[in-house]
Amino acid sequence: MAKLIDGKLLAEDVISTVKSETEKLVAATKVTPGIAVVIVGEDPASQVYVASKGRKAKECGFHSVQHTLAETATEQELLALIDELNNDPAIHGILVQLPLPKHIDESLVIQAINPDKDVDGFHYINVGKLGAGDAASAFVPCTPAGAMIMIERQHGHDLSGLTAVVIGRSNIVGKPMFNLLLSANATVTVAHSRTKNLEDLARSADILVAAVGRPQMVKGDWVKPGATVIDVGINRIPAPEKGEGKTRLVGDVDFDSAEKVAGAITPVPGGVGPMTIAMLMANTLVAACRAAKVPAPKF
Ligand code: NAD
């Protein structure tokens, strides 16, 4: 049976460092980390995410503001808000909740964020830094950054000689995950929807990261015995056993069969999810430290 990688516990660890380092920062410089979360429209899932980010920020001792724009807000209105936040010295991190309504160009909005406040790590300056091997001065997207901490807890910071396979090539998860693993000296392959013989490839991995968005796709016989399996997927499936119309969350990995083969595995929920929000807080603290020109803690 695989060791369970407890994302909740690890996330609490990160949050407790964020809290204590925030206290130190405030005491030394009077700078309180500030985060602005921007949401456009009423998407219920996005509302839930944004509310929990706001709560976590307050828990960390941050100054936290939420800007809610109507579904009908124009691109110009949103860009004007970003400009205002870029110029607000009390705000160190700006997060625009995605997806945005169809009439707004998501890329245009993200590229308008000051890269020094881009705590999601989606601005091309930060994407480029990570790609060039300069993760230390970049903001790294929160989900792969959290997944990487989980991997480091199993294998240490140097993954020399280990083979990693990332399934999924999104800008948010797959590609930055590739760069982080490569920077740590792993030999990395990125698989995607056009990959042939995915099962064989997955079975070659000492570290297998699934970021696909397909419920329980990765079966136990895709997993190399003893491998570390990081399940990024969050999928809602019907759960008639819980009652009519009920649902439950599952990952991209078929947990029951994979845990029999893996050496270590993340659950869903309670795995990568809690780490994502913790890393958002960590990135915001780092942004505030950089603005205050004091050394930032490492996570
Ligand atoms: P995405 O849809 O942008 O990318 C999915 C990737 O999977 C694509 O690159 C695609 O090529 C690949 N893919 C699709 N079908 C495939 C197949 N049959 N075989 C191999 N590869 C295939 O998704 P994303 O934003 O990267 O998210 C992936 C999953 O992670 C989703 O379930 C999402 O909800 C979840 N997610 C979780 C967190 C978190 O906090 N835990 C954060 C972001 C995303």
Image (cartoon, grey):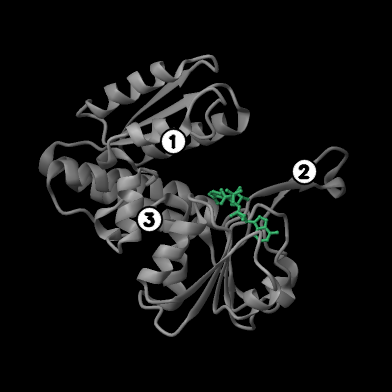
Q: Is residue 115 above or below residue 130?
A: above
Disc 3 marks which amino acid?
Val
Residue 31, by quadrant, is top left
Question: Gap between marks 1 and 2, in whole Å?
Answer: 33 Å
- CB-based contact (under 8 Å), mark 3 and mark 1: no
Whichever of callouts 1 and 2 sits on the residue coming sooner in the sequence is: 1
Of the two numbered discs 1 and 2 in the rendering, the one whose residue sits closer to the viewer: 1
Residue matched to label 3? 14
Whichever of callouts 3 and 1 sits on the residue coming sooner in the sequence is: 3
Q: Is residue 103 above or below residue 91?
A: above
The circle on residue 247 is 2
Q: Residue at x 45, y 46 (%)?
A: 277
Disc 1 marks which amino acid?
Ser
95 or 111: nearer the viewer: 111
Disc 2 marks which amino acid?
Thr
The circle on residue 107 is 1
Whichever of callouts 2 and 3 sits on the residue coming sooner in the sequence is: 3
Instruction: Tell me: is circle 2 under 8 Å from ligand 1.
Output: no
Quarter of the image where the C terminus is located: bottom left
